Image: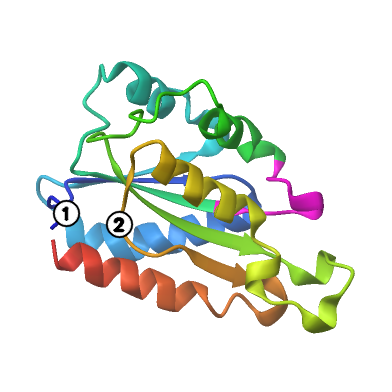
Amino acid sequence: MSPSIQDVVILHGGELSADVASQIETKVSPLVGGPTHVHQISMSKSKAFKAALLEDTDGLTKATTLAVFVAQTIENEAPPEDAGACIRFFKRKTHPETLLTEKCQFAVLGLGDSNLLLDRQHTSAKDCNQVAQVLDLRLEVLGGTRFCDRGEADERTGLTEVEPWIENLVEKIKGC
C-alpha cells in the first residue's frame, strides 16, 4: 500500500492545463487540510521541484509527496512552450533509474486535441496525448510510484474524461 499523502504538487504547462490544475486543486485542497499541503506550480517555474528531486534539500520530495502532472500535447506531439523544459528534464537519459525512488508518487493527466490530427474521424484521446504517455512511462522508469492510472482527455470531446479522472484521484487520496 502507498504511504499516506502529505503534500500534493500539481505541475501544469499551458493555459488549458492551468485551468485543469485549478480544478484539481479545488477538489483536493479540502481533503488535505492539516499536515497536508497543495502546491500548484507552472512547469515553466518548476526549477525548485526538479532541484529537490536531484538534491533533496528542501523536503518537498518524499514518499508522501504526490506529484500530479497535467501534461498537454499540442501540434506535432509536443508540449506547450511553458512545459517544454520540465518535460525535457524528465526525458533526460542521464538520470539514474532511482531518481524518483522514495521521493514521490506520481499521477499524470494528459490533455490533447484530436482536431489537430489529420485523421480526425478515427481518433480518440489516446491518439492526441503523446506527451502524457511518454512522461508517464518515463516517471515509472525513473523509479516513481504510480498513484493512479494515467488519464487522457480530448478537447474535441469537451474534455469529458477530466472530471472522472479527478474524482478517481480524490477517492484514492481519501483512501490514504
Identity, as a three-letter code, of the amino acid under mark 1: Ser
Q: CA distance from mark 1 to mark 2?
A: 8 Å
**Residues marked 1 and 2 touching at CB (< 8 Å):** yes
Where disc 2 sits, the SS reads loop
Q: Residue furthest left?
A: 34
Mark 1 neighbour class, 10 Å CA radius: few under 14, some 14 to 19, many 20 or more:
few
Q: Residues within 10 Å of mark 2 (few under 14, many from 20)?
A: some
Amino acid type shown at disc 2: Phe
Residue at 83% across, 83% down: 121
Vertical comparison of 43 with 148: above or below:
above
Residue matched to label 1: 2
Which residue corresponds to mark 2?
A: 147
Image quarter in which the N terminus is found: bottom left
- Residue 117 is left or right of residue 38, and the answer is right
Q: Quadrant of residue 48?
A: top left
In the image, is 128 to the left or to the right of 139? right
Label 1, secondary structure: give it: loop
**Badge 1 or badge 2: first in the primary sequence:** 1
Q: Position of residue 7 (x, y in %)?
A: 23, 44
- In magenta stretch: residue 72: yes
Residue at x 56%, y 27% (from the top left corner): 92
Q: Nearer the viewer, residue 114 or 101?
A: 101
Span colored in magenta? 71-80
Residue 142: mark in rendering: none
* Residue at image location 33% in from the left, 23% down from the top: 52
- The image shows residue 56 at horizontal and vertical percentages of 27, 20
Residue 10 lies within the magenta run: no
Does residue 173 sit above or below 95 in this rendering? below
